[in-house]
Amino acid sequence: MLLLGIETSCDDTATAVVRDGRTVLANVSTNQDEFHAKYGGIVPEIASRQHVALLSAAVDDALARAALRLDDVDGIAVTAGPGLIGSLVVGVAAAKALAFASGKPLYAVNHLHGHIFAAFLDADVEPAYPFLALLVSGGHSQLVDVRAPAEMQVIGKTRDDAAGEAFDKTARLLGLPFPGGPALERLAAGGDPQRVKFPRHRPDAGTLDMSFSGIKTSVRYFLDGDGGATPPADVAASFQAAVVDVLVDRVERALSARRYAAIVLSGGVAANDALQSAFRAAGERQATRVLIPQRRYCTDNAAMIAAAADRRGERARADALTLSADPNLAF
């Protein structure tokens, strides 16, 4: 089963060709950092216009790298949501046009489902159910109980900022360049994570929800009162440690409540080394298998979209060419 994947939910123009939801034959991704850097964040209109400019070439590039033609693939999988509406519309329109022109089936994929199955790309491992997924990105922070490929339930989520969003906002407070999350991680690598005792959100009884806005606000108040006495690297490391502690705490609480065959870390923030290390340690403490995507599959990519379509059986229920993008697509 060969699927062409298209992902344009935010600012990465991505295409891929994946066999059987696992083997990546081509993975193409172009970020737009240079277009958004001067604004300190992603500008939706710029993102959608860049997708228009890049997507056709990205599709051609993916097919060429896989040594295939469009007629050779068995279907086209596209992110239908959630995400930025302008960006999603570009990807969905392109996928519909390709499906119409080629006669291939069209599969609408939830972007978040893609992240969950990214850990099984180019990996000599198959999902063992049930597994627990910690999905951490710039727009989402969720704990997901995955009982079967098409049977998932969110059992914990952020009540305010996503973890990645908190990273980006704190990076701006520290005067770091865009994109802020990776810049903060690089700065934190040379700092003392115990230097500043930033607060850790504890969940209400009976929930696994998270909150990160308080940590970010604590950093702002600390910087206002510190007067530059504390090295920025120590502030960054201490902030990062607080976020990681909250995420790992929820994972361990979930593992204490229910038995899982494995735990999966996914989403853009999954590329963070400190989080990966703490996540693996939690798995060892709980004697639970740990799965983390290869770094290139942590951030938004089209291979994960094709993989999700295949593994969730989307190919058995192709979508109509009247498919519309949905920026608030439910999980």
Image: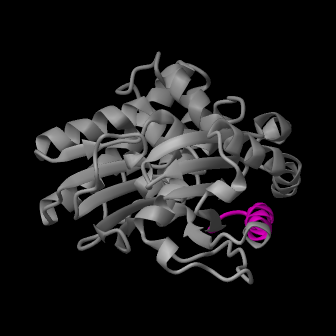
Report whether 21 appears left or right of 91: left
Q: Is residue 328 magenta?
A: no
Q: Quadrant of residue 60?
A: top right
Foreground of the two, 296 or 181: 296
Disc tally is 0
Q: Is residue 85 magenta?
A: yes
**Residue at image location 60% in from the left, 22% down from the top:** 228
Spot occupied by residue 181 in the image (x, y as percentages of width and height): 58, 37
Report whether 250 appears left or right of 167: left
Report whether 140 appears left or right of 125: right
In the depicted structure, whether residue 69 falls above or below residue 79: above
Spot occupied by residue 45 in the image (x, y as percentages of width and height): 87, 57
**Please, what is the dominant secondary structure of the magenta stretch?**
helix
Foreground of the two, 198 or 328: 328
Foreground of the two, 142 or 264: 264
Spot occupied by residue 76 in the image (x, y as percentages of width and height): 63, 63
Could you tell me if residue 41 is visible in this image? no
Q: Quadrant of residue 237?
A: top left
In the depicted structure, whether residue 316 falls above or below residue 157: below
Q: Quadrant of residue 130?
A: bottom left
Spot occupied by residue 303 in the image (x, y as percentages of width and height): 55, 49
**Residue at image location 56% in from the left, 22% down from the top:** 232
**Residue at image location 53% in from the left, 45% down from the top:** 268
Could you tell me if residue 314 is visible in this image? yes
Specify the segment rendered in magenta: 81-98
